[in-house]
Image (cartoon, rainbow, N blue to C red):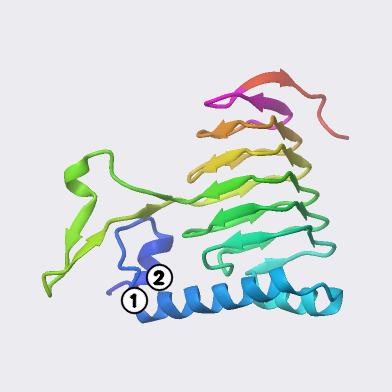
Amino acid sequence: MTMTEHEKLLAGQDYDYRDPELQNMLSNGRKLIGQLNQTTDLSQKNDIIKQLFNKVGQGLTINGHFEAIYGKHISFGNDDFINGNCFFQDSNLITFGDRVIVAPDTKFYCGQHSLDATKRFGTRADGSRYLITYTKSISVGNDVWIGGNVTVIGGVHIGNNVIVGSGAVVVKDVPDNSVVGGVPAKVIEQLKPLQ
């Protein structure tokens, strides 16, 4: 059975972003994100949010300018708070638990390219070249506070009851009940588990 380009994208395989299904998703995402960033009407904003994202729990707040690629690959839990100038490069799934706080200027990058420069571009049957991109999902647990100007890389799971210090670059999984910081992010403190 042949996979669609969207299925290849979600499976982390080489995919062709020019595929009509993906192009329609990109176009719809850009349109809805533009509307989300323009409106100040709370009811209208909530309607756009329901159309844009895969899943939205109760009490989602998007405070300020928001950017994403598709939108449909992002799921939010209950009472999540996303501050201004955050960017979601959701070329794979980005899933948030409940009570996640994301400070300004934070970025989530699901896409990546080969370390081998000779494998970063492919050739289609028609002879045209294309950039080869692979994707990995990102997941964030419950009760997480992600500080400002943090970068989270695809393939990472951030556990429950976690604080990610400002400016950190998260390249590997973060265990529950921890504070991480630095480049690359490392555990710098243990937190008392939540009751």
**Residue 19 appears at what percent x and percent y?**
34, 76
Q: Residue at x 48, y 51 (%)?
A: 110
Asked which secondary structure carries label 2, the reply is helix
Residue 64 left/right relative to 1: right
**Residue 157 appears at what percent x and percent y?**
58, 41
Asked which secondary structure carries label 1, the reply is loop
Which residue bears the numbered disc 1?
A: 19
On residue 181, which mark appears?
none
Q: Which residue is nearer to you in this view: 187 or 66?
A: 66
Query: In this picture, is 26 found above or below 183?
Result: below
Q: Residue at x 32, y 57 (%)?
A: 13
Amino acid type, label 2: His
Going from N to C along the chain, the mark reached first, 1 or 2, is 2
On residue 6, which mark appears?
2
Q: Residue at x 67, y 53 (%)?
A: 85
In magenta, the rendered stretch is 175-186
